[in-house]
Image (cartoon, helix red, strand yellow):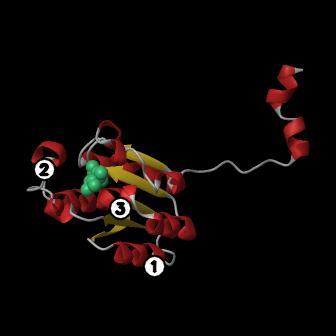
């Protein structure tokens, strides 16, 4: 079974009470319940954690090297500051999707820069809590996609498509 680590960064434990106009009224435990429900439907095992500490997030990312096939992370404020989280994601080299509830590109200038974006598969920003579910579907699709095997060059030369083109 696929195992995916879902990480929420600092202050996301306050969702539901925090800046409601920006982050909405859905509390973190409700978001987590929806993630677990979708994971069950997809037959994926998810491990969902939140921390207000950069080092703890780094340690969890490092630990994902054994036993996990992908990561979904909302690094929250560390998105815009943390070389350590970026380096940890680069080191473990697991397919990772970055999620933000708000659209970080429409807010203050300092939020436009993501230190982690350069080492992730993709970013979902501005779709509220649905972003986590889209990330889970996307990562599941990525991890289960059948990738075409490279054909030996001699076979390619005689493939019907090539023949028709001549
Ligand atoms: C956030 C956006 C960050 O800029 C902010 O620091 C957060 C939450 C989001 O989900 O929209 O705490 O990551």
In percent of width and height, residue 42 lies at 36, 57
Does 139 sit above or below residue 128? Answer: below
- Of marks 3 and 2, which one's residue comes earlier in the chain? 2
Residue in the image at 85% along x and 49% along y? 152
Residue situated in front as seen by the camera: 39 or 112: 112
Name the residue tied to disc 1.
Answer: 63
Name the residue tied to disc 2.
Answer: 19
Does 78 sit above or below residue 161? Answer: below
Q: Could you say which disc has been placed on residue 78 in the image? A: 3
In percent of width and height, residue 164 lies at 84, 22
Residue in the image at 34% along x and 67% along y? 46
Residue in the image at 56% along x and 70% along y? 91
Of circles 1 and 2, the one toward us is 2
In percent of width and height, residue 5 lies at 38, 67
Residue in the image at 55% along x and 64% along y? 90
Q: In which quarter of the image is the N terminus?
A: bottom left
In percent of width and height, residue 109 lies at 35, 42
Does 129 sit above or below residue 7? Answer: above
């Amino acid at each position: 079974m696929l195992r995916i680590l879902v990480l929420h960064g600092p202050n996301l434990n306050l969702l539901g009470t925090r800046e409601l106009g920006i982050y909405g009224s859905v509390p973190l435990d409700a978001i987590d319940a929806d993630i677990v429900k979708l994971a069950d439907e997809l037959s994926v095992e998810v491990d969902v954690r939140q921390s207000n500490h950069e080092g703890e997030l780094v340690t969890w990312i490092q630990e994902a090297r054994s036993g996990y096939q992908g990561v979904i992370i909302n690094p929250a404020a560390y998105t815009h500051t943390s070389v350590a989280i970026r380096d940890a994601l680069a080191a473990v080299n697991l397919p990772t999707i970055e999620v933000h509830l708000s659209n970080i590109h429409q807010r203050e200038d300092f939020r436009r820069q993501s230190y982690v974006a350069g080492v992730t598969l993709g970013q979902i920003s501005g779709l509220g809590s649905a972003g986590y579910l889209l990330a889970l579907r996307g990562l599941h699709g990525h991890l289960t996609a059948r990738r075409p095997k490279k054909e030996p060059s001699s076979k390619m030369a005689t493939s019907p498509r090539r023949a028709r083109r001549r």
